Image (tube, rainbow, N blue to C red):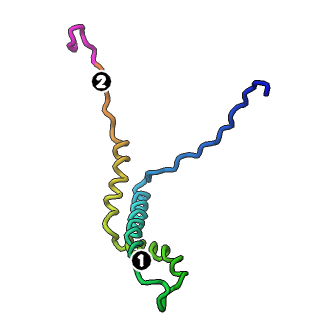
């Protein structure tokens, strides 16, 4: 080593994913997906405590592998028929940051003051 310092290679950084939907339609779709995910979370413990898959007319071990798909399908079906009523709250929560960022910022006005501190 002759004392030269080699440059450190840089790793390109990935762009951050969009977290907030940009249109009302995408906010509604995001709310739908979230609500069906919440319903699926409520259904998982129900299916976990149901009868065994080895029972007569059960699906055996294959049933355990396909159970998440069944739960998701039931959750999407429930959400399409009204769900739990979370969609309006989720949409308003997604619209709140957008409305706050688009609100007009207060404009500062400067006034000339005299040495006594009063405006002319």
- Where residue 112 appears, as percent x and y from the top left, is 28, 14
Residue at the image position 31 percent from the left and 32 percent from the top: 106
Magenta range: 111-120
Residue at the image position 32 percent from the left and 29 percent from the top: 107
Q: Please say if 59 is above or below 94.
A: below
Q: Which comes before the other along the chain, label 2 or label 1?
A: 1
**Label 2, on which residue?**
109
The circle on residue 47 is 1
- Where residue 49 appears, as percent x and y from the top left, is 40, 78
The circle on residue 60 is none
Task: Out of 93 and 38, give the one closest to the viewer.
Answer: 38
Q: Label 2 vs label 1: CA separation?
A: 63 Å
Q: Please say if 29 is above or below 80.
A: above
Callout count = 2
Q: Residues within 10 Å of mark 2 (few under 14, many from 20)?
A: few
Residue at the image position 54 percent from the left and 81 percent from the top: 61
The single residue placed furthest to the front in the displayed view is 1
Residue at the image position 32 percent from the left and 68 percent from the top: 84
**Label 2 element class:** loop
> Quarter-wise, where is residue 24 in the image?
bottom left
**Label 1 element class:** helix
Q: With 28 as the anchor, is 115 left or right in this view?
A: left
- Where residue 70 appears, as percent x and y from the top left, is 47, 77
Q: What secondary structure prevails in the magenta region? A: loop
The single residue placed furthest to the top in the displayed view is 115
- Where residue 98 appears, as percent x and y from the top left, is 38, 47
> Quarter-wise, where is residue 48 in the image?
bottom left
Q: Quadrant of the N terminus?
A: top right
Q: Which of marks 2 and 1 is in front?
A: 1
> Quarter-wise, where is residue 9 in the image?
top right
**In magenta stretch: residue 117:** yes
């Amino acid at each position: 080593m002759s004392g030269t310092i080699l440059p450190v290679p840089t790793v390109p950084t990935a762009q951050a994913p969009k977290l907030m939907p940009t249109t009302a339609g995408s906010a509604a779709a995001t709310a739908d997906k979230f609500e069906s995910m919440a319903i699926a979370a409520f259904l998982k413990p129900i299916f976990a405590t149901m009868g065994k898959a080895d029972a007569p007319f059960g699906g055996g071990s294959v049933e355990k592998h396909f159970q998440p798909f069944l739960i998701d399908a039931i959750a999407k079906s429930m959400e399409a028929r009204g769900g739990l009523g979370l969609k309006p709250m989720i949409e308003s929560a997604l619209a709140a940051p957008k409305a706050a960022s688009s609100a007009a910022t207060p404009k500062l006005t400067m006034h000339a003051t005299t040495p006594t501190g009063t405006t002319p």
